[in-house]
């Protein structure tokens, strides 16, 4: 668990350690399930997801930082092990392979996603091996039916629907222009809600 926390801190992702054993049910109050394929299930950690922060300490509302969890089925586990053997990589500890954790940085302006860190996890959610990367890829060019694109879009939709909560979890400050824009947006939403309420009351009357 300490290794997981250290991994977050090393790439600028602050969070609390993952508080559950792999054999337990993934807690719904921490992880948001998105989809399951024949090979794996996709979750993201809604408890610690937040926005990016630039070098000046300002929140970047275009950048979402979020840990993801992938649970593997036996076929996927065997496939991961086979690929490592084919590449001549160590398979020590992979007899207990559970899945993987990916620490994603999604840029909604550039429509790119970067897997800042990938960790293969054992049955105790301990890290078997880990890799870091500075390379990103476009998710906009993916097919709408692509499971990864659906996963990224679900994360983006969740962030949009919970923007205030993510801002509160981000260790940074809003730029004056962003703060003003958000305040104006709140006013528009409030006015719209008031108009809708009056329209419903008038219709009932």
Image: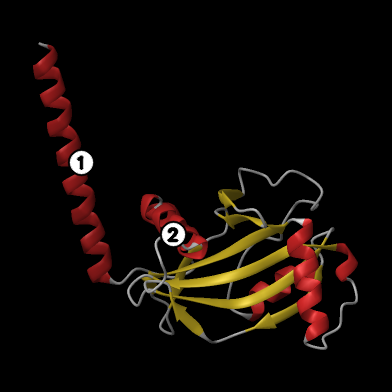
Residue farthest toward the top in the current orientation of the protein:
205
Query: With 64 as the anchor, is 37 left or right in this view?
Result: right
Residue at 35 percent of width and 77 percent of height: 110
Which mark, residue 145?
Answer: 2
Query: With 72 as the anchor, is 122 left or right in this view?
Result: right
Q: Where is residue 11 in the image (x, y as percent from the top left)?
A: 61, 80
The answer to which of 107 and 166 lies nearer the viewer is 107
Q: Which of marks 2 and 1 is nearer the N terminus?
A: 2
Q: In which quarter of the image is the C terminus?
A: top left
Judge whether 202 appears above or below 162 on screen: above
- Cα gap from disc 2 to disc 1, whole angstroms: 36 Å
Residue at 21 percent of width and 62 percent of height: 181
Judge whether 31 appears above or below 205 on screen: below
Query: With 8 as the anchor, is 190 left or right in this view?
Result: left
Q: Position of residue 106 (x, y in %)?
A: 45, 71
Q: Where is residue 131 in the image (x, y as percent from the top left)?
A: 69, 82
Closer to the eye: label 2 or 1: 2
Q: In which quarter of the image is the N terminus?
A: bottom right
* Residue 59, quarter of picture: bottom left
> Under tag 2, what secondary structure?
loop
Q: Where is residue 146 in the image (x, y as percent from the top left)?
A: 47, 63
Q: Can residue 1 be seen in the rendering of this structure?
A: no
Residue at 74 percent of width and 56 percent of height: 73
Q: Residues within 10 Å of mark 1 (few under 14, many from 20)?
A: few
Residue at 58 percent of width and 48 percent of height: 33
From the image, tell me which residue sits under label 1. 190
* Residue 119, quarter of picture: bottom right
């Amino acid at each position: 668990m300490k290794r997981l926390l250290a991994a977050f801190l090393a790439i600028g992702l602050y969070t609390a350690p993952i508080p559950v054993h792999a054999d337990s049910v993934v807690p719904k109050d921490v992880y948001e399930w998105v989809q399951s394929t024949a090979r794996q299930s996709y979750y993201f950690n809604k408890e610690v997801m937040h926005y990016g922060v630039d070098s000046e300490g300002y929140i970047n509302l275009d950048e979402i930082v979020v840990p993801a969890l992938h649970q593997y089925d036996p076929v996927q586990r065997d496939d991961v092990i086979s690929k490592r053997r084919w590449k001549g990589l160590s398979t020590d500890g992979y007899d207990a392979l559970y899945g993987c954790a990916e620490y994603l940085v999604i840029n909604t302006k550039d429509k790119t996603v970067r897997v800042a860190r990938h960790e293969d996890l054992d049955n105790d959610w301990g890290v078997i091996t880990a890799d870091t990367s500075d390379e990103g890829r476009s998710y906009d060019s993916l097919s709408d039916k692509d499971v990864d694109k659906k996963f990224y879009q679900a994360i983006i939709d969740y962030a949009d629907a919970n923007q205030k909560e993510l801002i509160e979890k981000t260790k940074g400050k809003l730029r004056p222009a962003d703060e003003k824009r958000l305040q104006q947006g709140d006013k528009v939403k409030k006015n719209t809600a008031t108009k809708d309420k009056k329209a419903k009351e008038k219709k009932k009357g």
